[in-house]
Image: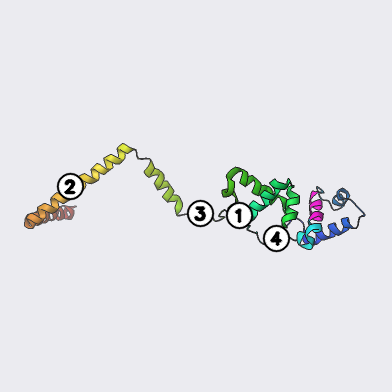
Amino acid sequence: MAKYSEEFKIKLVTEYLDGNIGYKLLAKKYNMPSATPLQNWVRAYKTQGMEGLKRRKRKEVYPVQFKLNTIQFMLDTGASYQETTEQFGLNNPSLIYRWMKDFNSQGIEGLKPKSKERPSMTKKPNKQKKKEENKFTREAELERENELLRLEIAYLKKLRAFRENPNVLLEKRKRNGHSNLKKKGSD
């Protein structure tokens, strides 16, 4: 919820514009900690009318080119943040300040929209697995590869022997399987 309602802003702006009281006294009269918001409301009302006092219902996403244009305007003219907001029909000088800060630190990439979504929970275990996989040294990777190759060779030898004489291997299996069944049954 907004700190000050639209009706409250209109009331104070009209009271100020009537000319009977200054910023500081008006802020004190309505128990505001500072006169700055009132000054901003009056300035916004003078440049944008009632639209300048309205609170935005949704967060506006500005194109990168628009952000670049506002920054370029400030740099070329030496305008203040407030003057720039008035020039481009914005009502929040801190918005341009943030754009300028992002642009100075990250360049054009800093002006691109950022995702506000939360990362999915399924990604966390994958990251942990990747970290564990990255822990393997080159030596450990080679040892693992050697073991896999040994297993593959043993498998191929058994396959070749089975193809040459399938009956011998089947008889061995039967004997081993039969003896295993006796062991299990006696437990």
Q: Residue furthest front?
A: 76
Secondary structure predominantly adopted by residues drawn in magenta = helix
Of residue 171 and residue 17, the one placed in the foreground of this image is 17
Residue hosting label 3:
119
Q: What amino acid type should be assigned to the residue bearing mark 2?
A: Ile
Name above or below for residue 143 compared with residue 115: above
Of residue 146 and residue 48, the one placed in the foreground of this image is 48
Disc 4/disc 2 C-alpha distance (Å): 70 Å
Which-is-in-front pick, marks 4 and 3? 4
Residue hosting label 2:
153
Name the colour scheme.
rainbow
Residue 42 magenta: yes
Residue hosting label 4:
56
Looking at the rendering, which quadrant does residue 104 occupy? top right
- Span colored in magenta: 36-43
Query: Residue 14 appears at what percent x and percent y?
Result: 86, 59
Residue 171 seen: no
Task: Return the disc, 4 or 3, that comes first in the chain's sequence.
Answer: 4
Question: Which residue does the image show at 67% across and 49% down from the upper left?
Answer: 72
Query: Mark 2: few, some, or many residues within 10 Å (few <14, many ≥20)?
Result: few
Task: Return the disc, 3 or 2, that comes first in the chain's sequence.
Answer: 3
Q: In the drawing, does residue 89 fall left or right of residue 158?
A: right
Which-is-in-front pick, marks 1 and 4? 1
Query: Residue 42 appears at what percent x and percent y?
Result: 82, 55
Which-is-in-front pick, marks 4 and 2? 4
Q: In the drawing, does residue 110 fall left or right of residue 164?
A: right
Task: Return the disc, 1 or 3, that comes first in the chain's sequence.
Answer: 1
Q: What amino acid type should be assigned to the residue bearing mark 1?
A: Val
Q: Secondary structure at mark 1?
A: helix
